[in-house]
Image: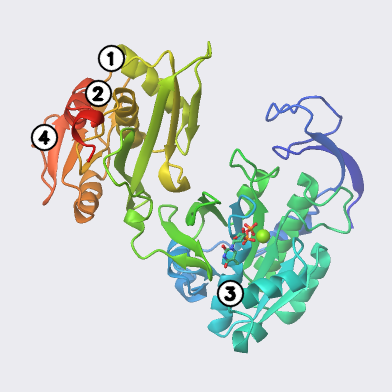
């Protein structure tokens, strides 16, 4: 057993230093260093987490392990898609999301899926009592029959006991809900501290690799979207999944932020309902809001989430500000892009928002970072300021440069086909230089070179008050 020593661990980035300091030198956060008794990571531990300790070198041409054979589908199509075909034996998956977003619900459904295919599941819960988990399972209709028998729930927070239980019962899946509630008996420091969370994860990885048991860890994320405290976990585990969405709305998006066994390009779309998370039949239209009549400040954008085109509604509201420093509020869109577009609109398109409060968000609680969202966002701002909706049936996509010029985005045809399929008739897109304008059946392409041209062609001529009110 290694010596226990006192160290100071940054609760933000996991850096370890010998002496207390006010600011972490690694990540620059203040007052995040907490005294922790850490064991030096024993060498054996490191070796054990490698798939094969003390192995001989094998050439690349040697037949690889057949990961397809080691994959076990969880029986939820959208999740299997994000995982790249299923859970890989011996892999460790971290599922992150805000409290109440549906992590425990999803994992209970995963457990039931595995159980339904004949595997046993061990569900260790430190967040809720065993009774609460069973109650939820009953509500979801998963508590009875062979599935109910095959999923065993244990309210346990000691990582040593959890790994012991898993080693003796050898389940097809171990769920630990959540990693912030488990702790190692051999470490001081409260559960949830970086030292504990790291240690627990290492111990569970050791179990996963040595016994080929897939382990799914739940991790809570903080408001700014990072996994609380232990950023370091993301490097340790094999797969990092994130659920996002608007807790008050029903839609949930599942993404892989990291996947050692597949692409991080796939997203899954679910809806939270009475019977838990249900896969959405037509994800492309799921995030569109319904309006009775064209709404100023609303622009539909065909974005690409990985390889999947989704139509999202960008909403903006601008209103004269009473404050000396007007508000800029963004939700689901990058606040820096919003600030930049406000500046570009003012200087390059004659749409001054300097004395206006500006609010921007995406309908459905989605969050999108792709640059193609620039043009729809800028059009939404212009549309709100002028109180004119877009020409009905229009979508827009494109990146905006500092000079107010528009730049093309990748995967344009795929996006536009999807928009056409959902009944949109017109797309405002950046002009493609040196190329023949493409064509997509069913949708008219309006190619423009600058943001000011885009505003001109996209907005309806007459203000709403004049023409559109019934
Ligand atoms: P939960 O899985 O407990 O979230 P997390 O583990 O991420 O904290 O889900 C919590 C929310 O989901 C809760 O507010 C109730 C809601 N919910 C439903 O709407 N339908 C359901 O069938 C279930 C089980 C939960
Ligand atoms: Mg939970």
Task: Return the mark for residue 162.
Answer: none
Tell me the CA gap for discs 1 and 2.
Answer: 8 Å
Tag 1–tag 2 contact (CB < 8 Å): yes
Q: CA distance from mark 3 to mark 4?
A: 54 Å
Earlier in the chain: of badge 1 and badge 2, it is: 1
For the C terminus, the image quarter is: top left
Residue contact at pointers 1 and 3, CB within 8 angstroms: no
| Mark 2 / mark 3, whichever is N-terminal | 3
Please indicate whether residue 56 sits to the left or right of residue 292 in the image: right
Badge 3 marks a residue whose secondary structure is loop
Q: Is residue 172 visible?
A: no
Q: From this viewpoint, is residue 303 visible? A: yes
Q: Earlier in the sequence, mark 3 or mark 4?
A: 3
Alpha carbons under labels 1 and 3: distance apart: 54 Å
Mark toward the viewer: 1 or 3: 3
Residue ID for mark 4: 435
Asked if the beta carbon under badge 4 is closer than 8 A to the nearest atom of ligand 1, the reply is no
Q: Residues within 10 Å of mark 3 (few under 14, many from 20)?
A: some
Q: Which residue is mark 2?
A: 451
In three-dimensional space, the C-alpha distance between marks 4 and 1, rounded to whole angstroms, equals 26 Å
Q: Quadrant of ligand 2?
A: bottom right
Q: Position of residue 199 (x, y in %)?
A: 77, 53
The correct choice, above or below, for 15 with respect to 155 in the image is above
Label 3 within 8 A of ligand 1 by Cβ: yes
| Residue found at x 69% / y 45% | 230
Element type at mark 4: loop
């Amino acid at each position: 057993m290694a010596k226990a020593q006192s160290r100071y661990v940054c609760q933000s980035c996991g850096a370890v230093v010998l002496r207390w300091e006010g600011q972490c030198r690694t990540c620059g956060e203040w007052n995040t260093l907490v005294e922790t008794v850490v064991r030096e990571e024993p060498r054996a531990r490191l070796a054990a987490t490698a798939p094969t300790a003390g192995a001989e070198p094998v050439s690349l041409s040697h037949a690889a392990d057949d990961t397809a054979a080691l994959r076990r589908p969880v029986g939820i199509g959208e999740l299997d898609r994000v995982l790249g075909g299923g859970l890989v034996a011996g892999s460790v998956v971290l599922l992150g999301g805000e409290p109440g977003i549906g992590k425990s619900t999803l994992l209970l459904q995963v457990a039931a899926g595995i159980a339904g295919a004949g595997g046993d599941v061990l569900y260790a819960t430190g967040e809720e009592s065993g009774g609460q988990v069973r109650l939820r399972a009953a509500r979801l209709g998963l508590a009875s029959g062979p599935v109910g028998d095959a999923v065993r729930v244990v309210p346990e927070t000691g990582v040593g006991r959890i790994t012991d239980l898993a080693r003796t019962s050898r389940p097809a899946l171990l769920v630990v809900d959540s990693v912030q509630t488990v702790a190692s008996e051999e470490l001081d420091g409260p559960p949830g501290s970086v030292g504990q969370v790291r240690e627990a994860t290492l111990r569970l990885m050791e179990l996963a690799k040595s016994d080929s048991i897939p382990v799914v860890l739940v991790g809570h994320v903080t408001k700014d979207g990072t996994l609380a405290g232990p950023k370091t976990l993301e490097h340790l585990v094999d797969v990092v999944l994130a659920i996002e969405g608007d807790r008050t709305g029903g839609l949930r998006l599942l993404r892989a932020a990291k996947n050692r066994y597949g692409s991080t390009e796939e997203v899954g779309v679910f809806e939270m309902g009475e019977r838990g998370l249900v896969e959405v039949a037509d994800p492309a239209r799921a995030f569109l809001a319904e309006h009775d009549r064209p709404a100023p400040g609303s622009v539909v954008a065909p974005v690409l989430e990985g390889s999947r085109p989704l139509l999202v509604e960008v909403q903006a509201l601008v209103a004269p500000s009473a404050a000396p420093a007007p508000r800029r509020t963004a939700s689901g869109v990058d606040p820096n892009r919003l600030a930049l577009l406000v500046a570009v609109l003012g200087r390059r398109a004659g749409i001054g928002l300097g004395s206006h409060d500006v609010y921007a968000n995406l309908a459905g609680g989605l969050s999108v970072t792709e640059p193609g969202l620039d043009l729809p966002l800028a059009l939404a701002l212009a549309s709100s300021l002028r109180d004119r909706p877009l020409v009905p049936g229009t979508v827009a996509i494109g990146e905006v440069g500092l000079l107010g010029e528009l730049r093309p985005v990748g995967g344009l045809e795929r996006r536009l086909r999807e928009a056409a399929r959902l009944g949109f008739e017109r797309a405002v897109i950046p002009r493609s230089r040196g190329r023949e304008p493409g064509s997509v059946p069913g949708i008219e392409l309006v190619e423009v070179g600058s943001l000011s041209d885009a505003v001109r062609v996209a907005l309806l001529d007459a203000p709403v008050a004049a023409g559109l009110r019934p």
